């Protein structure tokens, strides 16, 4: 044996020895909630799974939790990341036909984004019930239950605090991540202790599997789901690329709705805008304004005893990325993110064109300049008025941003402001053009401030729990927005507790969160009319598509819909499979052929 071989053997022995000595220490760090070291398991099929620390989260009681991130990679360049905060998928990276990888899932770079935009449920587990519960009440047996009314007088996606806001316990088994969570009896008004398990796994065959299971201690209603917004061109590419997607759905019926409430009917999709039984280009059927998008439950065409079946397929011809969804649930909610905010919606002629129209100064860029100038004015106003809480004007900033982005197209009026907020607006208008009277941006901002003052109504400020000022704090402002047009969360919780026979003290409102342990929201998120996603991308209406498998909406109150009541001893199961691959071929031919087929059917 040569001397070089002996040196190589000695070197390998040292590496093995160092590795064995570090196993125990790594295991201890993985078990620690605050550990940030990465641990990897390599699968024989070429799939890797890694775990690391993502953020620290403070719950309503001020307790600190470690949010863990799990990352899968396979040999086909697919990477998927999941958090245990809300059992939430935060990233899905896929290659295109050229091998270039893009993140196709809408989301955020940090935990603060998911906290601030929590009402959108990006990538999260939804429960106890998905979608709507009419009048926030239902009856099981002879007992009526009332749940949190977070959507007018109705309950939406589990109420004020659903499973998307919980930190789930985690366990790794091979290449599977198993998360568990317990929802106590009468949480959000729902009966029974509910024990849930969510299992995540990525395979070498490009299949991402998500499986939910639940058991209960009392009869209750359960409809868990996952809400993922996809844009196969890349999360940042916006609505103009969504319009180039081709969608196919295995759904022959839909459940009509009036003001988001199902009528109880089940109608055929033939001769309706919901017929995707043959592939259709989304830009052809969505129209050119945000309200023409989709937010509708469709009925999956399944056999009587069939379990997991094909639900739908999305294809983005320019990149070749394709995704299929399979599930064992009877329904699927087709959602094109109509509620994401304001943006420029292209006409169908623009969609067909390969080159975008050149604009001297897009409205979005002009709005950004206006808001940057307003930030400087804001500092001067705070100093002149000697305000003690200069950061508590997020409502006003959001209102001004709305006027700036819509450029005078705001038709509604009656915005309510406090006397302090009104004085703030008046002073801002006075000083905006003090030094640069002829500057176009200054004059533009002054015009916007004048329009805002004409639209607002001055009212006495509401009493905020724990506040010593008439100005809303950031946390209380967000809590007030969540209460919609009805009572505040505190009052809703008290009503739920009283009607369900639960002591008031068992339910805590968000405004009771201890001030010393608070989740910090960066200032760049605080614009209620814009959603700033990963890398600062602006998410607009029609910027993503969700195929959310679920039971039918309000099924607990409509006996003709599939049963959603879970009894003790039974096991609720919801299986979802996302399959990804790349479609080869000429993308122009795919779009042209689809358009020709659609035109032949319409003439």
Image (cartoon, rainbow, N blue to C red):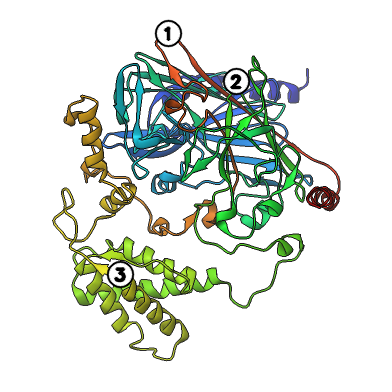
Q: Secondary structure at mark 3?
A: strand
Q: Residue at x 29, y 63 (%)?
A: 393
Which residue occupies the extreme bottom position in the image? 438
Label for residue 456? 3
Q: CA distance from mark 3 to mark 2?
A: 71 Å
Q: Quadrant of residue 381?
A: bottom left
Q: Are marks 1 and 3 in contact (CB under 8 Å)?
A: no
Q: CA distance from mark 1 to mark 3?
A: 56 Å
Q: Earlier in the sequence, mark 2 or mark 1?
A: 2
Q: CA distance from mark 2 to mark 1?
A: 49 Å
Instruction: Inspect this view and state whether residue 513 appears.
Output: no
Q: Secondary structure at mark 1?
A: loop
Question: Which of the two residues, 2 or 262, is positioned nearer the viewer here?
Answer: 262
Whether residue 341 sits left or right of residue 242 in the image: it is: left
Position of 479 relative to 453 (above/below): above
Residue 387 spot, x, y in % from top left: 20, 68
Position of 300 relative to 13 (above/below): below
Residue at the spot of label 1: 569
Question: Which of the two residues, 603 or 193, is positioned nearer the viewer here?
Answer: 603
Q: Earlier in the sequence, mark 1 or mark 3?
A: 3
Q: Residue at x 34, y 82 (%)?
A: 432
Position of 440 relative to 354 (above/below): below
Residue 553 spot, x, y in % from top left: 49, 33
Residue at the spot of label 2: 16
Position of 162 relative to 590 (above/below): above
Q: Secondary structure at mark 2?
A: helix
Whether residue 139 sits left or right of residue 228 in the image: it is: left
């Amino acid at each position: 044996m040569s001397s070089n071989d002996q040196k190589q053997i000695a070197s390998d022995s040292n590496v093995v020895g160092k590795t064995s000595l570090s196993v125990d220490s790594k295991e201890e760090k993985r078990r620690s909630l605050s550990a940030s070291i990465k641990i990897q398991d390599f699968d024989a099929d070429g799939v890797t799974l890694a775990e690391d620390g993502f953020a620290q989260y403070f719950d309503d009681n001020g307790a600190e939790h470690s949010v863990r991130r799990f990352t899968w990679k396979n040999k086909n360049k697919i990477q998927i990341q999941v958090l245990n905060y809300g059992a939430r998928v935060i990233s899905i990276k896929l290659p295109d036909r050229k091998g270039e990888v893009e993140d196709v899932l809408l989301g955020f770079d940090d935990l603060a984004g998911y906290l601030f935009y929590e009402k959108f449920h990006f990538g999260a587990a939804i429960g106890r019930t998905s979608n709507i519960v009419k009048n926030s009440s239902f009856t099981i047996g002879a007992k009526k239950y009332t749940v949190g009314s977070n959507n007018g007088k109705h309950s939406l996606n589990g109420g004020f605090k659903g499973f998307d806001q919980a930190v789930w316990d985690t366990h790794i088994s091979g290449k599977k991540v198993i998360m568990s969570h317990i929802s106590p009896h009468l949480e959000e008004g729902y009966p029974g202790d509910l024990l849930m398990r969510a299992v995540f796994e990525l395979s070498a065959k490009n299949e991402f599997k998500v499986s939910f299971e639940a058991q209960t201690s009392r009869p209750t209603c359960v409809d868990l789901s996952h809400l993922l917004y996809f844009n196969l061109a890349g999360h940042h590419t916006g609505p103009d690329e969504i319009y180039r997607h081709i969608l196919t759905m295995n759904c022959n019926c839909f459940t009509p709705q009036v003001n988001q409430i199902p009528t109880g009917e089940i109608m055929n999709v033939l001769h309706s805008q919901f017929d995707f039984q043959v592939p259709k280009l989304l830009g052809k059927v969505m129209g050119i304004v945000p309200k023409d998008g989709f937010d509708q439950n469709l009925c999956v065409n399944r056999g009587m005893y069939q379990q997991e079946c094909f639900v739908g397929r999305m294809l983005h011809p320019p990149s070749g990325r394709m995704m299929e969804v399979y599930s064992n649930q009877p329904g699927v909610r087709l959602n094109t993110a109509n509620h994401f905010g304001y943006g420029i919606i292209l006409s169908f002629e623009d969609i067909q064109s390969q080159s975008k129209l050149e604009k001297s100064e897009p409205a979005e860029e002009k709005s950004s300049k206006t808001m940057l100038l307003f930030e400087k004015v804001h500092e001067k106003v705070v100093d002149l008025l000697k305000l003690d809480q200069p950061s508590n004007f997020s409502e006003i900033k959001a209102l001004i941003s709305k006027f700036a982005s819509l450029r005078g197209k705001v038709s509604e009026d009656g915005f309510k402001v406090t006397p302090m907020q009104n004085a703030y607006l008046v002073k801002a208008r006075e000083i905006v053009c003090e030094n640069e009277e002829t500057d176009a941006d200054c004059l533009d901002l002054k015009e916007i401030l004048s329009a805002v003052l004409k639209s607002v109504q001055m009212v006495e400020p509401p009493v905020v729990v724990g506040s010593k000022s008439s100005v809303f704090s950031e946390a209380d402002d967000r809590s007030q927005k969540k209460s919609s047009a009805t009572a505040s969360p505190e009052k809703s919780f008290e009503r739920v507790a009283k009607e369900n026979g639960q002591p008031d003290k068992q339910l805590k409102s968000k405004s009771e969160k201890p001030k010393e342990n608070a989740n910090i929201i960066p200032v760049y998120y605080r614009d209620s009319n814009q959603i700033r996603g990963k890398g600062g991308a602006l998410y607009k209406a029609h910027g993503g598509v969700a195929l959310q498998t679920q039971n039918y909406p309000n099924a607990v109150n409509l006996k003709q819909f599939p049963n959603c009541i879970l009894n003790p001893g039974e096991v609720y199961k919801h299986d979802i499979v996302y399959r990804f691959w790349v479609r080869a071929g000429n993308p122009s031919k795919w779009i042209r052929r689809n358009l020709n087929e659609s035109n032949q059917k319409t003439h």
